[in-house]
């Protein structure tokens, strides 16, 4: 497979923003002290103007210990069987009450019975450094299906355009 669009441009960054904002859940991947990876699903609390993802967590959880030990992390998102997003970057712990107020959703009360004032509530800020997406939606899906059929018939591999696949360097 030949991949075009390996440079970062404003169009790809904006497409990445729209994709990030479309996911309500993501897999947050952290490192254990043994250096093995540990993934778990997390509700996305928000995406800020710098494309940082925000999650809420209990301060007494394993993921907080793992982030305290090693800030390197990844986030993986999937929608259906065609839209995928992989991010790598750094995670940090944030105890800013005003940010918690800003990101609070009533659905979080399931984990935090005392609401946004729960003393165990802490935020995880994930700052992506590199993102890669695969999104053959809309017209791109039709173009991708056509390209896949052409490749199948001719015995070649498909050429994927930047609207379908891109690597975005953010930092």
Image (cartoon, rainbow, N blue to C red):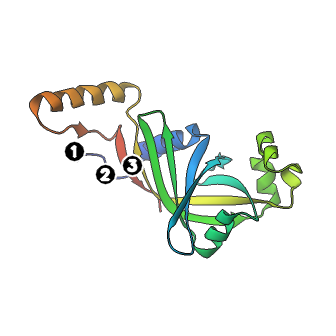
- Residue 9's label in the rendered image is 3
**x then y, percent, for residue 90:** 55, 65
Residue at image coords 29%, 30%: 144
Lower sequence index among marks 1 and 2? 1
The residue indicated by pointer 2 is: 6
The residue that label 1 is drawn on is: 1
Is residue 39 found left or right of 8 in the rendered image? right
Q: Nearer the viewer, residue 168 or 155?
A: 155
Q: CA distance from mark 1 to mark 2?
A: 13 Å
Mark 1 lies on a secondary structure that is: loop
Look at the numbered disc 2 and give the secondary structure of its residue.
loop
Res. 34 visible in picture: yes
Name the front one of labels 3 and 2: 2
108 lies above or below 34: above
Q: Is residue 93 left or right of residue 77?
A: right
Please give the name of the residue rendered at 41% of the width and 30% of the height, measured from the top-left corner.
Answer: 137
Q: Residue furthest left?
A: 154
Q: Can you see residue 51?
A: no
From the top left corner, tell me how far across and down residue 123 is, in percent.
72, 58
N-terminal-most mark, 3 or 1 = 1
């Amino acid at each position: 497979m030949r991949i075009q669009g390996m440079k970062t441009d404003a169009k790809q960054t904006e497409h990445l923003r729209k994709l990030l904002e479309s996911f309500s859940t993501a897999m947050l991947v952290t490192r254990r002290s043994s250096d093995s990876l540990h993934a778990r699903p997390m509700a996305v609390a928000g995406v800020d103007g710098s494309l940082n993802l925000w999650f809420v967590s209990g301060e007494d959880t394993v993921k907080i210990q793992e982030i305290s030990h090693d800030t390197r992390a990844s986030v993986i998102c999937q929608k259906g069987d065609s839209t995928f997003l992989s991010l790598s970057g750094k995670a940090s712990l944030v105890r800013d009450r005003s940010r918690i107020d800003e990101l609070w959703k009533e659905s979080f009360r399931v984990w935090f019975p005392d609401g946004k004032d729960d003393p165990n509530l802490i935020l995880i800020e994930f700052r992506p450094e590199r993102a890669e997406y695969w999104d053959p939606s809309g017209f791109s899906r039709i173009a991708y299906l056509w390209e896949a059929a052409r490749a199948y018939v001719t015995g070649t591999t498909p050429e994927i355009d930047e609207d379908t696949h891109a690597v975005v360097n953010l930092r």
